[in-house]
């Protein structure tokens, strides 16, 4: 042994020393990581052959080891960290020689590349990375940040610290639309930093708020970090829970958990929404508080804010921008509360209710039962036992044929479901509420224009609700819905046309509304469970291209932007038809209304594709598309290259037992929270010197089987890690956001200004992590509500 260290400990030191040395060398990170793995393996192989690296292995043939097994201790929990007095023997770190370890590592590399990069189950989700990158870079090149910064500065500028608050708002908005940290920091550094300095803002506050706000893209969906972390965490969670259930003598993870051991990227997007907004709020609160304490370092600035509604009345803004929207939302909630709106699900299974399952599987062994009661509580276990007894008494033990319902029974249950269904569907109500909010906003923005078109649209909403309650039942087909509501739809569309024209005349709404619609479309389809992140990313990329082309065409008076608008309307029509009618190709019988809907969907598809191709041509002619595609390819290639290189380094750690050594160390602690706290501290420290990609692909796979293999909520664990990784962009000396800002800052801004400026925001990150630790409901609230 070297310096009294175990051979595996020396191997870990050598491996990570090679990693840090390779990263500091200046070579591209992907090649540096893979090269560090090759060099470390060579050094370890030479030392092992020389008989220098020896590992103290537990003697699994000893009486003490057998006694622990007899006491019921799982083999995976037996280690020298937990039982230091166990007999050991010295063995080389490569028990069968480095040649065998090398062959095995090469085979594992091939398998992992196939599973995680080329053709594995996670490759579809990873495709979302490329399209989210394309979406972000396209929006960044469309100069959306310029207009946003100008508009938000006019809104918040007159407040103390208003320019800093506007930077936070724009940073959060760009995070949800672009998610590219480098692009956001550079853009805001070029546009906002000179303005802030010119108006007397402190260099520290100016640089700190720009750098911190630029990193919000790492946590606010759609975040590339969450996509990458989610694909990895999902695999780790399912594997770890299966092993954990086996150790508890349960048949599988489904039995122990009471639900599938699945962690999807969509769920993580839901979980990240509130923490991202919460962090942005903390940034803005700090900027505002700083301005109140040091008003001379963050003065209020009047950038020519003007309002056409100020002279209408003292309560105009309060009425139309707060009171009326709140009243509409409360009215919709009230309809749900009194049973006039809600679910209209009337599908009846031909199998009797005996096919239902209890909350938990109760036909398990004693050891598994004890573990399940400890996890879920005695009350839930007793309830599951009672449910299973009722199911058995109702015929749960009957055969499939014996449990088949007759046609009369199915029809009777269907009629009962129709009778109990709400008169108004929740989905339809949401559409009416969104239209009503648009009308109210239009009245508030342009109070002096004719109210007749808006009132016609509002009357259409009222008429639609009345017709829905009076004539439409849950049994009505989509075609009947469209026929009965044709007049209300026409009235609402007429009102929306005029409302959008009025909203477009407002400078702030004209800047915010188009990308906001794109964000809602992308995130809404994911958070609402309509689709998974990959199709949503494709929608976002296409929408970003069309939005960028529209902005370019607006700047050219000789070109018309109508083809882009027609394409947008065609996309909206496809979404409506796809969610209303059954447009599946493989169905055996196609009704008349579904056939008509399919025909119009095909037409809308060709219109939207033609519009998209036209948008690509516009961007290509304006010299925008080529750099966007090139930059997207570079970022995506970098991500996948780091993924490949990190797999090589991980497999080197596995080859000499380094990964299991770290996991045994963590398992030696009795408290899951203590283990997770140690992991979070390590990740925080590593964030000073490593990029988030290296941490995700090198460190998380090592500690993942431990932190995902217990009772902690996997979504909470993953979001905590994501927020921690966000800090790596801000921590000196190698925070990437600091380098981006340093590159575009004026000469009067020193590196010291930037470092001092980000320190408060790093502390805010730590405070935010602490609050998420103490109040995990901030993370789990949205997934629980949407589930």
Image: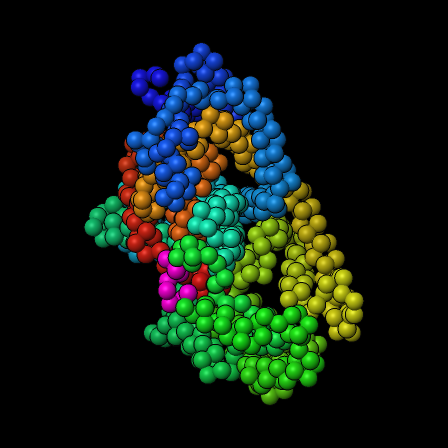
Question: In the image, residue 86 lies at what x, y percent?
Answer: 33, 31
Horizontally, residue 393 falls left or right of residue 411, namely left
Can residue 633 be seen in the rendering of this structure? no
Q: Is residue 269 above or below residue 741?
A: below
Can residue 766 be seen in the rendering of this structure? yes
Q: In terms of depth relative to the viewer, which is nearer, 78 or 487?
A: 78
Question: In the image, residue 223 lies at what x, y percent?
Answer: 49, 47
- Residue 443 within the magenta-colored segment of the rendering: no
Question: In the image, residue 49 lies at what x, y percent?
Answer: 47, 13
Q: Is residue 658 above or below residue 492?
A: above
**Span of residues in magenta:** 373-381
Q: Residue at the spot x=67%, y=47% of the render?
A: 616
Q: In terms of depth relative to the viewer, which is nearer, 284 or 56?
A: 56
Q: Residue at the spot x=56%, y=77% of the render?
A: 394
Q: Considering the image in quadrants, where does the N terminus appear? A: top left
Q: Is residue 486 above or below residue 497?
A: below
Question: In the image, residue 68 lies at what x, y percent?
Answer: 36, 39
Horizontally, residue 362 falls left or right of residue 673, namely right
Among the 4 quarters of the image, the one containing residue 353? bottom right
Q: In terms of depth relative to the viewer, which is nearer, 12 or 370?
A: 370
């Amino acid at each position: 042994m070297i310096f009294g260290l175990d051979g595996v400990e020396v191997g870990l030191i050598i491996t990570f020393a090679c990693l840090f040395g390779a990263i500091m060398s200046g070579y591209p990170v992907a090649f540096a990581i893979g090269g560090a793995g090759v060099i470390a393996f060579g050094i370890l192989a030479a030392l092992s052959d020389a008989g220098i690296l020896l590992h103290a292995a537990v003697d699994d043939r000893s009486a003490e080891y057998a006694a622990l097994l007899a006491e019921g201790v799982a083999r995976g929990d037996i280690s020298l960290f937990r039982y230091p007095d166990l007999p050991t023997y010295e063995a080389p770190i490569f028990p069968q020689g480095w040649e065998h370890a090398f062959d095995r590592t090469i085979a594992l590399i091939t398998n992992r590349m196939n599973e995680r990069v080329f053709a594995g189950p996670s490759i579809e989700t990873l495709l979302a990375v490329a399209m989210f990158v394309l979406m972000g870079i396209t929006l960044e090149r469309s100069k959306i940040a310029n207009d946003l910064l100008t508009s938000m500065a006019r809104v918040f500028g007159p407040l103390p610290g208003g320019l800093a608050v506007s930077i936070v708002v724009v940073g959060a908005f760009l995070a949800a639309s672009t998610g590219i940290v480098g692009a956001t920091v550079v853009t805001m550094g070029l546009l906002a930093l000179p303005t802030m300095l010119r108006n007397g803002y402190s260099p520290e506050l100016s640089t700190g708020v720009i750098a911190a706000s630029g990193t919000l893209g790492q946590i606010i969906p759609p975040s590339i970090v969450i996509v990458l972390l989610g694909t990895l965490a999902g695999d780790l969670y399912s594997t770890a829970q299966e092993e954990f259930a086996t150790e508890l003598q349960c048949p599988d993870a489904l039995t122990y958990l009471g639900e599938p051991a699945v962690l999807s990227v969509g769920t993580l997007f839901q979980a990240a929404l509130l923490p991202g907004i919460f962090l942005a709020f903390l940034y803005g609160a700090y900027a505002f508080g700083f301005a109140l304490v040091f008003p001379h370092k963050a003065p209020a600035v009047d950038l020519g804010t003007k309002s056409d509604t100020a002279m209408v009345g003292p309560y105009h803004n309060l009425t139309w921008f707060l009171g009326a929207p709140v009243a509409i939302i409360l009215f919709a909630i009230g309809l749900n509360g009194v049973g006039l709106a809600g679910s209209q699900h009337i599908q009846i299974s031909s199998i009797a209710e005996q096919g239902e399952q209890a909350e938990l599987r109760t036909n398990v062994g004693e050891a598994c039962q004890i573990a399940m009661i400890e996890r879920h509580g005695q009350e839930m276990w007793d309830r599951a036992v009672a449910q299973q007894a009722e199911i058995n008494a109702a015929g749960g033990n009957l055969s499939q044929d014996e449990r088949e319902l007759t046609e009369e029974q199915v029809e009777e249950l269907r009629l009962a479901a129709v009778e109990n269904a709400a008169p108004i569907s929740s989905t339809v109500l949401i559409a009416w509420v969104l239209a009503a909010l648009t009308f109210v906003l239009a009245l508030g923005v342009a109070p002096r224009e004719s109210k007749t078109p808006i009132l016609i649209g509002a009357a259409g909403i009222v008429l639609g609700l009345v017709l829905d309650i009076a004539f439409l039942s849950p049994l009505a087909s989509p075609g009947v819905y469209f026929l009965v509501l044709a007049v209300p739809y026409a009235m609402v569309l007429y009102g929306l046309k005029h409302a959008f024209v009025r909203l477009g005349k407002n400078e702030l709404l004209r800047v915010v509304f188009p990308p906001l619609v794109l964000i809602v479309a992308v995130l809404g389809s994911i958070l609402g469970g309509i689709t998974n992140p990959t199709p949503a990313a494709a929608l976002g990329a296409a929408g970003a291209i069309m939005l960028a082309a529209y902005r370019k065409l607006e700047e050219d008076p000789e070109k018309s932007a109508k083809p882009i608008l027609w394409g947008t309307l065609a996309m909206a029509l496809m979404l409506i038809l796809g969610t209303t009618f059954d447009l599946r190709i493989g169905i055996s019988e196609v009704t008349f209304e579904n056939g008509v809907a399919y025909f119009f969907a095909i037409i809308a598809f060709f219109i939207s594709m033609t519009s998209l191709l036209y948008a690509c041509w516009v961007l290509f002619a304006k010299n925008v598309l080529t750099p966007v595609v090139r930059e997207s390819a570079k970022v995506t290639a970098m991500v996948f290259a780091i993924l490949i290189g990190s797999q090589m380094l991980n497999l080197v750690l596995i080859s000499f037992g380094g990964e299991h050594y770290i996991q045994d160390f963590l398992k030696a602690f009795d408290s899951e929270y203590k283990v997770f706290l140690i992991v979070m501290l390590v990740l925080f420290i590593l964030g000073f010197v490593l990029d988030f990609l290296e941490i995700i692909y090198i460190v998380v796979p090592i500690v993942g089987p431990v932190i995902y293999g217990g009772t902690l909520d996997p979504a909470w664990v993953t979001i905590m890690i994501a927020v921690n990784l966000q800090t790596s962009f801000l921590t000196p000396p190698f925070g990437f956001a600091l380098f981006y800002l340093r590159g575009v800052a004026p000469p009067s801004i020193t590196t010291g200004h930037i470092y001092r400026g980000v320190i408060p925001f790093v502390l805010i990150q730590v405070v935010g992590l602490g609050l998420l630790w103490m109040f995990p409901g901030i993370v789990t609230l949205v997934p629980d509500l949407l589930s």
